[in-house]
């Protein structure tokens, strides 16, 4: 346990270092030494995050590495919009590194299986056209104490959002009628929901979905196929644990 806690502290230190590196890069996007420093910091955080089970954090750090590598190769330009997304991402990584561990959330005398969690959060709205995906997301979040409402298309989701009762929206990208990107833009264009956390579920083989989601106003993303490892962690990062 002592080694695990030391690794958690190391992850926090690395997340802060990565934040500082990206802030310096934002001041001078054309400095190659800053690109290298950011890439090295992201790589270090990714390795430590994997060792302590922060799979969502490791995946996000890996995405930052890919973006920085593309910038070094001259394939993309680090314009202000992209740098803002990167700053938002490293802020999430810093928050994730400070999340309590399972042992802190559940004392030895109480396990998730024998406890009766009660939600202190507003409900989570799940939007997915696949019944299997909706059921999986619903079960994972309910198991950890979150109240969940699931719908199958973007139009129904928008009407649910208008009720004002949700604490977070988790949406697929590909949806019938109104897709996930359009749904996020609708939410963000309404001042009432400017601060509503939005989590977007992306395909592993389509990294463009992640940046389209960030560009529309999503706060974070999860990769389909890794929900068991990352979904609850991501939701907890954005709105806190459900248990009181």
Image (spheres, grey):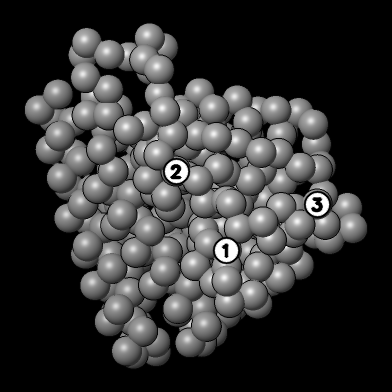
- Numbered-mark total: 3
Q: Which image quarter is the C terminus in? A: top left
Mark 2 lies on a secondary structure that is loop
User: Which element type, helix, strand or loop, lies under badge 1?
Assistant: loop
| Vertical order, 199 against 56 (above or below) | below
The quadrant of the image that shows the N terminus is top left
In this image, 45 relative to 17: left or right?
A: right
Residue found 80% across the figure and 36% down from its top: 130
- Residue in the image at 46% along x and 27% along y: 144
Image mark for residue 156:
3
Task: For marks 1 and 2, give the one nearer the viewer.
Answer: 2
Residue that appears at 27% across and 73% down: 21
Q: Which percent across, then down, holds residue 67?
A: 50, 68
**Farthest residue in the left direction?**
2
x and y, in percent, of residue 113 in the image: 41, 12
Give the camera-side residue of 55 and 144. Answer: 144
**Residue matched to label 2:** 121
Q: First in sequence, mark 1 or 2: give its number.
A: 2
Q: Which residue is the site of mark 1?
A: 218
53 on left or right of 78: left
């Amino acid at each position: 346990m002592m080694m695990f806690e030391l690794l958690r502290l190391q992850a926090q230190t690395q997340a802060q270092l990565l934040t500082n590196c990206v802030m310096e890069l934002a001041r001078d996007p054309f400095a190659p030494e800053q690109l290298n420093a950011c890439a090295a910091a992201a790589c270090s955080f990714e390795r430590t995050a994997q060792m302590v089970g922060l799979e969502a954090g490791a995946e996000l750090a890996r995405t930052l590495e890919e973006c920085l590598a593309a910038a070094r190769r001259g394939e993309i330009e680090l314009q202000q919009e992209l740098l803002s997304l990167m700053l938002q991402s490293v802020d999430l990584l810093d928050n994730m590194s400070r999340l309590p561990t399972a042992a802190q959330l559940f004392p030895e005398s109480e396990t998730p299986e024998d406890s009766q969690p009660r939600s202190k959060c507003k409900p989570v709205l799940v939007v997915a056209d696949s019944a299997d995906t909706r059921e999986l997301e619903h079960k994972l979040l309910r198991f950890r104490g979150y109240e969940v409402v699931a719908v199958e298309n973007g139009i129904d989701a928008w009407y649910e959002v208008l009720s004002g009762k949700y604490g977070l929206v988790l949406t697929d990208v590909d949806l019938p009628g109104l897709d996930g990107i359009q749904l996020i833009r609708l939410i963000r264009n309404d001042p009432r929901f400017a601060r509503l956390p939005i989590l977007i579920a992306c395909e592993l083989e389509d990294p463009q979905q992640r940046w389209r989601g960030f560009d529309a106003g999503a706060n974070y993303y999860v990769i389909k196929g890794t929900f068991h490892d990352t979904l609850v962690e991501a939701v907890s990062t954005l709105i806190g644990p459900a248990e009181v």
